[in-house]
Amino acid sequence: MRITDLHVDGFGVWHDLRLKKLSPEITVFYGPNEAGKTTLMQFMRTMLYGVDEERRERYLPPREGGKPGGRMGVDSDGQRFEATRYIERDKGDRGRVAVYRADGETEGDRLLREALEGVDEATYNNVFSVGLDEIQTLGTLSGAEVSKAIYRLTSGLDRVSLYDVIIGLRESRQELLGGVDETSVLAGLLNRRSELMTEIIDLSAQGRRWSKIAVEIDEIDAQVLDARARLKEAERAARRLEVAIGLKPLWSDRAKIDDNLLIYKDLRALPDSAIDHLDQLNREIEEHTRQRDILRGQRRQIREEINDLGINGVLMRSCCRLDALGEQVEWIEALEREAEEGDTELNGLTARIESETKRLASMWSHDPEHAPELTREMVNELEPQGKALAAAERNLRTARENLEAKQSSERRYQAKIETAMAAGGKMGLPSDINEAGELVARLRRRQQAENKLELAERHSREVEEQSYEWEDRQVIPLEGFFLMGGVFMIGVLMAGWWLLHPTTAFEDLGGGWMAALGAALAVGVWLYKYYREDSASEQLENCQRQMEVAAKQIKEAERDLQALGAELNITDGSASLQLQHAERHLAELEQTLPIETQRRQATEEVAAAEAELESAKLRMADAKKKWSQALGALGLPDTLTSEDLLAMAGQYEQLGEWQLKADNRQEWVERREREYNKVTARIMAIAEEGDLVVEDASPLEQLEALLSERRLQQTRIDQRKKLIDRGRSLKDKMATHAKDIETLESRREALFRSAGCVDEDAYRQLAADLAKRAELYTKRERVTREIAAAIGRLGTEEDFAELLSADKIGRLDGLWTERAAEKEEIDNLLRDLLASRGALCEKQTSLAEDASIAEKQLELGEVEAQLAEAKERWRERAVIGQMLELIRSDYEANRQPETLVEASRYMKQLTAGRYERIWTPLANDILLVDDHEGRSLGVEALSRGTREQLFMSIRLALVAMYARRGILLPMVLDDVLVNFDAGRAKTAAKVLIDFASAGHQLFVFTCHEHVWEMFKDLHADVRRLPSRYDDVVEEEPEIEAVVVEEPVEEVVEEAIVELPAPEPTPEPVEATYLELQPREETEVVTEAVYEQLARPTEAIVETTITGPVPPTPRREDFEEEVEYFWDELPDEYDLDGASTPLPEVDVYASVWR
């Protein structure tokens, strides 16, 4: 998992903070105190795991506004996505997560959870986050505490070391069975058992007197039991007599009820719902009878309706002829319409013939009364002159249209030219194309002059900036000056010391050679300073010359620009716009050149078309003259045109056609009238037969009346059929009801016969008698229940039947008196026996006050049980301890934990090879460090800086171990180099960069500028957080990607993360340990080389030992060792300070091969 981008919308003091393109290896964030570094770290954790109560209270709502939350770019296993988390106001809300994939799809937090590889926030903080608070806490611990704290890192933060298990077992076994002079559980139990056995023998002699009294008490107890039995029997007999006296009224009532029941003993039984069933049959018979009467009335009404319909039989016999006439209604209507239309058309033709004849006659120059008829021969004679006149008219029309088209084309070309001229005139541009070209050339020179001026000014600024740099380089920085001065003084002192003491100075180091070296150092430093200052001075002079040349070029460009501006009369900034207008106007003028040529050609064509029009007019006049002469010869008006002549000839022909058409129409009308008269006669015959003649009605109206009556009669016939069918249906229903009535009456008679009754009244009287008998039975049962309740547990009715018989019921009071006297006598005897027993018990109590023998015997049994349990516990601990001792010996001789091997490599790099190996003797809760000479040193013997290097080595090894398991998460380090000197800090920075290059992403936060400068020199991705105050922040160079960050003015306090207190050493656990037999599983894992051997495969088996021990696995031909870890379970298994034993213990066995 890699974090590629961060965008803080609102969190604490940050608002709209954007950090883009974060390095996949190491990114260093620098900022002074209260710059917001801790807020940014907490924002990262919030984006990964959500906001908890502490972060919500401290950082929300945002101080500078914005939506609480932000976005984070993630690259996980080659899959890029953006995760957003925004927090609502609800206190229980950890932040709503939305993931935006690269393909644009949106989903929930699944990809983010998969990228975290199941690592929770606590594990992330303990493994992947290293803070200054942990370093400071490490420095406050003593040597032994530091050793234990660092040792626990090697086995993880959630495990108990094997050493704690071994010590706990040893102490627990020592408590069970110690040495001769030591107190132990088993020794104490043995001593207590001997004491109890002696005390029991001494107390046994005092029990003989007590036994004799006990025999006498037993005899009296037997007499007391007998007296109490007799007393109980007497009380029971008296109680029975009392109950019998109270039962006398109830017993008499029940006897009376039995006498009454004898009256109804011979009644025939009926069902419980007999009367209801009878009532139901009566209701059904009554309902069917009522329905039958209703149906009979409906049938009678149907017959009356059929008689009232009134059907015309004559009309219905002629229905076929009437239907045929009904189908010819449209034809009859068509005959009427055609006859009417024929008369109208005939009248119109006659009138038109007369009018047209008069009109044609009036068109002749002769008398209209005697106008000759125009013939086809006359028209053929005038045809040549008419064709010539028509051709002349067509030529004239064509010439006129051609002239108009040429004139329109000429006007269109002229408009285009005038438009181009007008556009240039509005902007003050010349209308001549040559002048426009010169203007464009001057404007382009003006633009080139502006560009030249801009380039010169830019070059001048660049040279000026270079001059500032070279001027700064003339002065050596203070650090470099002191360094050079120191080297120079050392060289001078070495040479001077040798000159003063040539024989004794540097005897062991070469004498004069050391002096020559010192002189060379001094001369070298002086030459370096001289050449540096001289080079900077030359470069500065060169920059000044370039600045002078640039100033001359600027002046020349400004002078040319002013000259062109005065010539063009334009202001600054408008030359480019006017150049665009001028170029566009020039292009338009260039486009008008072919248009001008076309316009001139169009003018010539207009002149030719005008000449053609004049020629056509002359030919038209000659044709009209010849036409007039021909008309005069035939006696026609000279105003008559050829079209009129042709129209008149056609009209004479049409007039003849109209006359023929009128004759044909007259014959057709007469034929239609005959057909119409035949149909109307048939209609009237049918109407007279059915006596349905309508006065003053047309044939169609009469036919419509007949058809309406026919439809009405058909409807009545259909209605009659329906009524008949309905009557039949009602008849069937009546028969059904009659049958149902007969069936129900038969069932009712059968009901009476089954009860032995002659009619319904006898049946109902039988039901009433049965009800009375049932009431008497109910009353008898109630009295019987009262008798049973009064008797209760004293017996049954049979027991009291003898007492309540006729011969004893009168003597019940005397019998009760006798039983009362007997009870009082037995009661007095019982009091005497109890007094004697009390006296004997008092004597026995005085002897039995010392009842310690029973207590001692009970205590002896408990001691025996505890002794057996303690022996079993000691054997279990002895077996487990021996096994763990064997594991420890083999482990220390051959193996090291994987974490320590990795940590040794980082420790060697951090200390530049001074310390080469970190290891631990398993039986002790300590770490040992071997230096380059092979000496093993404890952690308490190391300096504080070396301890911090050891701590960082182990933390890096833990992160690397997680990475080999496939869990790659960003590691956060907060000012972890603050206590290192310059050399150690630089070495640690290189180790961190190498560690990041191995595939880990690191985020380093620091408030120390020298750390920031150190990582910058190592070419790491360094970022300076935006200042939230008004001080100026130096711009840092861009590395690979530019991070644009907006300044945010906010106030925030640095978060102080308190590390959890070191866990106390657990007290020995009182538990029952079963025999441990590891079960092994083999998983082949290919990893790095471990001590020139293949890395061992590891199988971790979790076994809860609560039952029988599994069988010991078969030992293979290779050596193996088993590492056991006691699992610390939370809450219910946390028994620090408790004395109750655990019934079962979880053990983890790690098998190495």
Image (spheres, grey):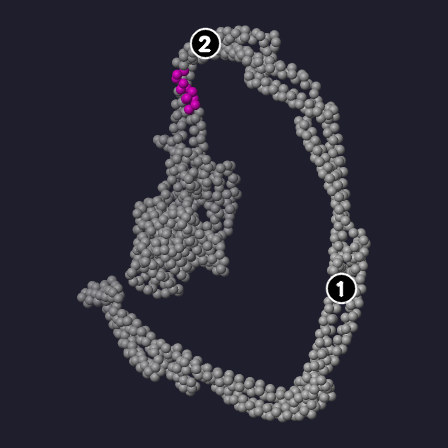
Q: Which residues are magenta?
A: 848-859
Q: Position of residue 927 (x, y in %)?
A: 36, 47
Give the mark nearest the N terminus, 1 or 2: 1
The picture quadrant where one finds residue 746 is top right
Quarter of the figure that contains the N terminus: bottom left
The tag on residue 332 is 1
Most extreme residue toward the left is 500
Q: Secondary structure at mark 2?
A: helix
What's the residue type where badge 1 is placed? Ile
Residue 913 can be seen in this image: no
Q: Secondary structure at mark 1?
A: helix
The secondary structure making up most of the magenta span is helix
Q: Residue sitting at 69 percent across and 92 percent down?
A: 633
- Residue 736, compared with residue 759, is above or below; it is below
| Residue behind mark 2 | 831
- Residue 808, compared with residue 853, is above or below; it is above
State the CA–CA distance, disc 1 to disc 2.
Answer: 142 Å
- Residue 1058, compared with residue 252, is above or below; it is below
What's the residue type where badge 2 is placed? Arg
In terms of depth relative to the viewer, which is nearer, 903 or 1000?
1000
